Image (cartoon, grey):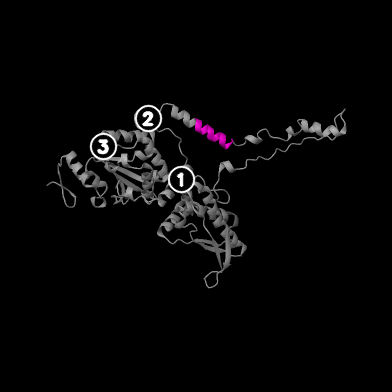
Amino acid sequence: MAKVTNAYDLPARRVIHTVGPKYAVKYHTAAENALSQCYRSCLELLIENGLQSIAMGCIYTESKNYPREPATHVAIRTIRRFLEKQKNKIAAVVFCTTTSTDTEIYKRLLPLYFPRDKHEEEVAISKLPADVGDENGETIIDERKIRIKPLPKKNIPITLQPPVGLPVTDVGLVRRNSSYLDFYLDPAFMSLIKDPDQRRQEQWEKNAQEQRGWNYAKMLGFGDLGGPILSAAEEYSLHSRYLAKAKSLNLSEIAEMKIVYRGGVDSEGHPVMVVVGAHFLLRCLDLERFVHHVVKEFEPLIQKPYTIAYFHSAATLQVQPDLGWMRRLQQILGRKHRRNLHAIYVLHPNFHLKATVFALQVFVDNMTWKKVVYVDRLLQLFKYVPREQLTIPDFVFQHDLEVNGGKGVIVDPRTKYVYHRP
């Protein structure tokens, strides 16, 4: 709900007050619809009080754990839906942001819902989430839809004469027990849309059948890749839930392991995320907490083109996760990660890693894993990512010297800088 009061000494005619919802992952849909109602109630009060413009802050707050980007989608699409109906009564809606993060999100998402030209409209079609809400901007849930089809209009002659041989008092019984109503009922009335429970059961049976069938990736030792393919809306919802959970957790012990950390920028100016394979200690690592850490670290980068530098140096000494886990992580990161990923530079690859990447191309995602670039030497990596933009562990330099024999290079022991041998 929203309430309106006088503005008194503030530079406005009225002040509209509302309270944003608390966010919990298990009540994601309820929080979205409550937030949408907050924005819509404010706009309804605007019109009721004869006002034509409104400045709106971000109703969602950090203290209520609402993910920023999903909340922005709800805010903008609710405004868009309302203006579609009341555009003649509202002159301006101003979004007031107080942080640079919110400003960047609004700048990126506003053209999707309010395209200014044909090009932005085409981009919006490809980048808008699958669920843009109903006519009010609220989340649509198939299971809660009322599926009713209007009865067909048929001109059926109705005779008021009772059947011969029956008393007048029995006429109603005859009509009630006859096929009189069959003329009015559409046989497809209750089967317009398949029952949601039946659809879900069929999906489960299909998934179970796929898992019982030949799983070539599992036979080759790459892990279990059985399981449903998620839609864009499902991946977006999955990513939002993990991101919200990650922001509420203390993941300092994962960060201290230095498996994933931010670098500088590559030679083309793209931000770099560094991944160290030898630090991935699978035996003593909580994979679920690690996934939350990855989602939290990658979130600022995946909004625009970025690069991954993966150090496979000495990683063969550690047990690595299988393809099934990699596929799940890719689904959680979402399609934005795959679309904006510029390249993955792999340092010191071996035959097993190349075979794994090939399997990822075949069984998981050809588009993403085609971006892998193999680099055998540090000097080759520095052509793509300048040395001063990377924080490289000491053992990577040592491994590079052992593998390549130090031919043609000199490593400064103090700065770890690699020079060509004169």
Identify the magenta region.
194-205
Provide the residue designation for mark 2.
Answer: 218
**Res 163 quadrant in image:** top right
Rendered image: mark on residue 348: none
Q: Quadrant of the N terminus?
A: bottom right
Where residue 373 appears, as percent x and y from the top left, is 29, 40
Q: Earlier in the sequence, mark 2 or mark 1?
A: 2
Provide the residue designation for mark 3.
Answer: 316
Provide the residue designation for mark 1.
Answer: 236
Can you name the residue that lies furthest to the bottom here? 9
Label 2: few (<14), some or many (≥20) within 10 Å? some
As measured in the structure, the alpha-carbon distance from the residue carrying label 2 to the one carrying label 1 is 27 Å
Tag 1, which secondary structure?
A: helix
Where residue 63 appears, as percent x and y from the top left, is 45, 57
182 or 252, which lies in front? 252
Tag 2, which secondary structure?
A: helix
